[in-house]
């Protein structure tokens, strides 16, 4: 590989989420989330793990921020826990919870790190779930009230905002297959109704940010990037087949994950946000399950955003049939697999951002990308993770090619800064640049953290 330069104004960052790292699940007035409850159900989370303590970031944030600074981090994507701020989800505000994020933001800024705040990363308030959760249209107002509280407190110092993280996951796995919190197995119609309310909540959050932010806001969201890549990157027909697949609600193959149509796709979520309408093929797939759309809904959902985020880890290969139709291909037997058994497909970071930019004509930011590996501390006291370095080198090379193709890609956030609670997988999956010993809470930067520090500092991939 040749050395590759990224633009000098390219945003390099790392990411984490509240429930996955904070711990302090019942401290200082925090209310329970659906994940606190889900973790109590036998057999739902690996070995009974929970986020009760996690990485204890709630207490250790000063040293975690200092470590980020040492590792060259200049942008940090965090999330705010809704039930930490408003314990019942609506009503009384927990000042201690707000104060925590106040202190965290101040610490980041003092360290020269720009906070990117995600307003919802899956930890829905339990009390509101018991009142119907995302199935209720009232959830739009509940979320809006919470967003206003956060914006009024933090927006004098926070300018970068992400409304929602991965509706495909928290609805698909949480409400359709039941493998994640809150563990529901809803009908197709119920899932799409909940999804419509989620999209409305996104739009209301954008409106509130525009109306109430004290510093000019830069707003986006972070859906899954369901990526199709061409089998032959030099073949125009294969490229078009992959493009068509990514723009189709069937391209994501929700059925293979046990989900109803539309949920595992790009356009069912992205088209309403950018174009103000659901995609025609998605409407056909929904049939009688199509959610009720009230007057003004699509105008709320399609509030202008400043960037299109995408969480991209893998991709599926496509070629064109003789008639030009997309043909999905199985992964070759030699395809590397992460510890999560996800296929390693570096080209997903070229074609995913490129196709999303072509369709939506917005700057694209890779809001998550990373790999779970079987990391441990070696006898020399360090964590050697050459495969993560190799993963990063391959994926970032492809991201550079996307920029070279003309895609307006503005940034990259690595998932994650710390090993953390990986939802139903508990603490089995280690995505971090920093190893966490969950017994002692000792942090040990991995070799990949130092490799990425050099890239983030120089804006250059080594040869």
Image (cartoon, rainbow, N blue to C red):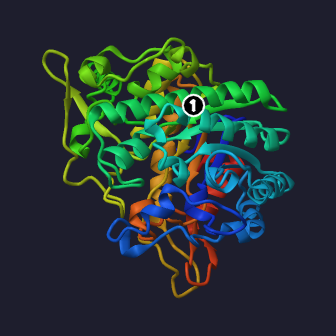
Residue 344: horizontal and vertical position, in percent? 35, 51
Q: Is residue 424 above or below residue 148?
A: below
Q: Please state which of residues 318 and 27 is positioned toward the viewer in this rendering.
A: 27
Residue 331: horizontal and vertical position, in percent? 22, 46
Q: Please state which of residues 119 and 71 is positioned toward the viewer in this rendering.
A: 119
Residue 358 seen in the current view: no
Q: Is mark 1 on a helix, strand or loop?
A: helix
Residue 435: horizontal and vertical position, in percent? 56, 72
Residue ID at (34%, 27%): 246
Quarter residue 364 falls in? top right
Q: Please state which of residues 438 and 48 is positioned toward the viewer in this rendering.
A: 48
As drawn, is 58 to the left or to the right of 123?
Answer: right
Quarter residue 8 falls in? top right
Tally the marks.
1
Q: In this view, does 38 lie above or below 119?
A: below
Residue 217 seen in the current view: yes
Q: Is residue 36 above or below residue 253?
A: below
- The residue at the far left in this view is 322
Q: Please state which of residues 10 and 289 is positioned toward the viewer in this rendering.
A: 289
Residue ID at (19%, 20%): 325
- The residue at the far bottom in this view is 379
As drawn, is 182 to the left or to the right of 159?
Answer: left
Residue 133: horizontal and vertical position, in percent? 48, 43
Residue ID at (73%, 47%): 115
Q: Name the residue under label 1.
A: 202
């Amino acid at each position: 590989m040749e050395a590759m330069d990224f633009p000098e104004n390219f945003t390099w960052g790392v990411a984490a989420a509240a429930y996955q790292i904070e711990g302090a699940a019942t401290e200082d007035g925090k209310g329970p989330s659906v994940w606190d409850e889900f973790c109590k159900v036998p057999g739902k989370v690996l070995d009974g793990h929970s986020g009760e303590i996690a990485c204890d970031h709630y207490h250790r944030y000063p040293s975690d921020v200092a470590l980020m600074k040492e590792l060259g981090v200049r942008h940090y994507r965090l999330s705010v826990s809704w039930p930490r701020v408003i314990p019942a989800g609506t009503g009384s505000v927990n000042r201690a919870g707000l104060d925590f994020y106040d202190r965290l933001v101040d610490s980041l800024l003092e360290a020269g790190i720009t906070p990117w705040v995600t307003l919802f990363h899956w930890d829905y308030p339990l009390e509101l779930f018991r009142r119907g959760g995302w199935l209720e249209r009232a959830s739009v107002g509940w979320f809006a009230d919470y967003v206003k509280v956060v914006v009024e407190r933090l927006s004098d110092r926070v300018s970068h905002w992400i409304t929602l993280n991965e509706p495909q996951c928290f609805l698909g796995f949480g409400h359709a297959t039941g493998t994640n919190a809150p563990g529901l197995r809803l009908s197709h119609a119920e899932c799409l109704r909940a999804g419509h309310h989620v999209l409305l909540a996104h739009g209301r959050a954008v409106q509130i940010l525009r109306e109430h932010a004290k510093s000019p806001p830069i707003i986006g969201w972070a859906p899954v990037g369901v990526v199709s890549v061409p089998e032959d990157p030099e073949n125009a027909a294969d490229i078009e087949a992959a493009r068509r697949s990514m723009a189709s609600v069937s391209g994501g193959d929700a059925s293979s994950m046990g989900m109803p149509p539309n949920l595992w796709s790009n356009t069912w979520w992205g088209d309403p946000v950018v174009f103000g309408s659901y995609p025609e093929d998605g409407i056909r797939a929904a049939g009688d399950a199509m959610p009720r759309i009230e007057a003004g809904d699509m105008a709320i959902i399609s509030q202008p955003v400043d960037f299109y985020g995408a969480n991209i880890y893998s991709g599926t290969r496509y070629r064109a049939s003789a008639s030009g139709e997309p043909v999905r291909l199985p992964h070759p037997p030699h395809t590397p697999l992460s510890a999560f058994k996800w296929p390693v497909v570096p080209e997903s970071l070229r074609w995913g951002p490129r196709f999303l930019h072509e369709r939506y004509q917005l700057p694209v930011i890779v809001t998550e990308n990373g790999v779970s590996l079987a990391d441990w501390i070696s006898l020399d006291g360090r964590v050697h993770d050459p495969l993560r370095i190799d993963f990063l080198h391959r994926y970032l090379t492809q991201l550079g090619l996307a920029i070279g193709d003309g895609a307006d890609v503005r940034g990259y956030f690595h998932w994650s800064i710390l090993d953390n609670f990986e939802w139903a997988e508990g603490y089995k999956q280690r995505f971090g640049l920093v190893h966490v010993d969950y017994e002692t809470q000792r942090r040990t930067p991995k070799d990949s953290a130092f490799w990425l520090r050099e890239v983030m500092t120089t804006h250059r991939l080594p040869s």
